[in-house]
Image (cartoon, rainbow, N blue to C red):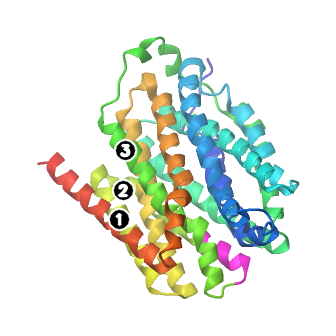
Amino acid sequence: MQQINPESKKVKAVLLLISSLTIMSMITISPSLPDMTEAFSDTPNGAKLVKLILSFPGLFIAISALIAGGFIDKFGRLKLLGFSLVLYAVGGVSGYWLDDLYLILAGRALLGIAVGISMTIVTTLVADYYQGKARQKFAGLQIAVMSLGGIIFISLGGVLADIHWRVPFLIYFFSLFILPFAYAILKEPKQQVKIEKQETAAKSPRLIWLVFFNVMFMWILFFIIPIQIPFYLKDIGVESNSMIGLAIASSTFFSAIAAISYSKIKDKFSFAQLFALGYFLMAIAYILIAMGNTYTMVMLGMLFAGLGMGIMIPNANIWVMQLAPAEIRGKEIGRLTTFWFMGQFLSPLLLLPLLDFLTQSQLYYLIAGILLALSSFYLVFHFFRNK
């Protein structure tokens, strides 16, 4: 067992690069969706299937994360990492060459499996390498870098989509760049040696399930932004894919600002209070989008949505890391990943059918109402838990 210095810049850089693949997997091709819809207009249910392309990996991330979590607890954190990074490139880039919409969806499924494995591994490694305040700081940094990576990837995706809707798929080759650095720098954590067959006895408190379901609801309500906002912007006269990409990327920019400040914010508030704040900021976002039909109002909405998610994502990660015993940490983080991406997968399935009898503005008002209810729930939860 080789020693590793978790404060090493190289270690942090590799962990952050692998983390960036998660957000990149889902939103990079978002600006391509309107043009893809037109390209597959002759395919039965083509418009619905194209929207599903963005969230489809979420189902396979959810399934593979459960399996990966148990596997890494038993056999080590790094056994599957190389496989996942290669599979990421294969599944992601396949959309550049494929002409059949169903085959593109199959490629997105492979991408989802790869992300489910890699995200579970990297989040578990963060929990293994860092403790206490250091873990809190790195979790905020992790989400901030993921958000900043999202800005780069989705903005680049918007520019490349103006060339052709297929070109953004080539960005997924990025995982192969990370591969050699991952194996050269990351090492199996020491505590893996100590974990033998204790996982059968170890149990997390029931409270962890509240965090899991909360993460799912959070993503169901937020993920409608990268799926539907490109079409909303087209409807109000924004034709440039680059501008559409910039609008979605702006939410990740403000998410990064909130996430990088998470550690300082967490020192002053409880986990429940931060969820209440995050949901309140997201409610403001959807109200602003619903109220106005201008690009400026949408951008303002993206600001508040990003701030809300930037607080809640590291908040959920740290809460689970704190609640999960080390013996079953990989398993519990696998579950967290499952609920995270199940929310992304379910988002269009649950929310888009509402557009059959609601306007887009009415849908955003409805989501805002749900978000305000969730914010109120966590305020009450905090009050009774700390009474």
Residue topped by disc 3? 211
Residue topped by disc 1? 370
Quadrant where the N terminus lies?
top right
Depth check, front residue: 152 or 279:
279
**Compared with residue 228, is residue 145 higher up or lower down, i.e. above or below?**
above
Secondary structure, mark 2, is helix
Q: Which mark is residue 264?
A: 2
Separation of disc 2 and disc 3 at Cα? Answer: 21 Å
**Among numbered discs 1 and 2, the one appearing first in the sequence:** 2
Outermost residue, top direction? 197
Separation of disc 1 and disc 3 at Cα? Answer: 17 Å
**Compared with residue 139, is residue 333 higher up or lower down, i.e. above or below?**
above
Residue shown at the point (54%, 79%) measured from the top left: 299
* Crowd band around label 3 with a 10 angstrom C-alpha radius: few (<14), some (14–19), many (20+): many
**Among numbered discs 1 and 3, the one appearing first in the sequence:** 3
Separation of disc 1 and disc 2 at Cα? Answer: 28 Å
Magenta portion: prevailing SS class: helix
- Residue 34 position, x and y percent, is 72, 72
**Among numbered discs 2 and 3, the one appearing first in the sequence:** 3
Do we see residue 268 in this rendering?
no
* Crowd band around label 2 with a 10 angstrom C-alpha radius: few (<14), some (14–19), many (20+): some
Which mark lies nearer to you, 1 or 2? 1
Secondary structure, mark 3, is helix
Secondary structure, mark 1, is helix
Type of amino acid under label 1: Ile
Which mark lies nearer to you, 1 or 3? 1
Where are the magenta residues, as a range? 239-249
Residue shown at the point (58%, 36%) measured from the top left: 63
Asked if the residue at tag 2 contacts the one at tag 1, i.e. Cβ–Cβ closer than 8 Å, the answer is: no
Type of amino acid under label 2: Lys
Residue shown at the point (49%, 21%) measured from the top left: 191
Tell me which corner region of the image, top left, top right, bottom left or bottom right, holds residue 180. top right
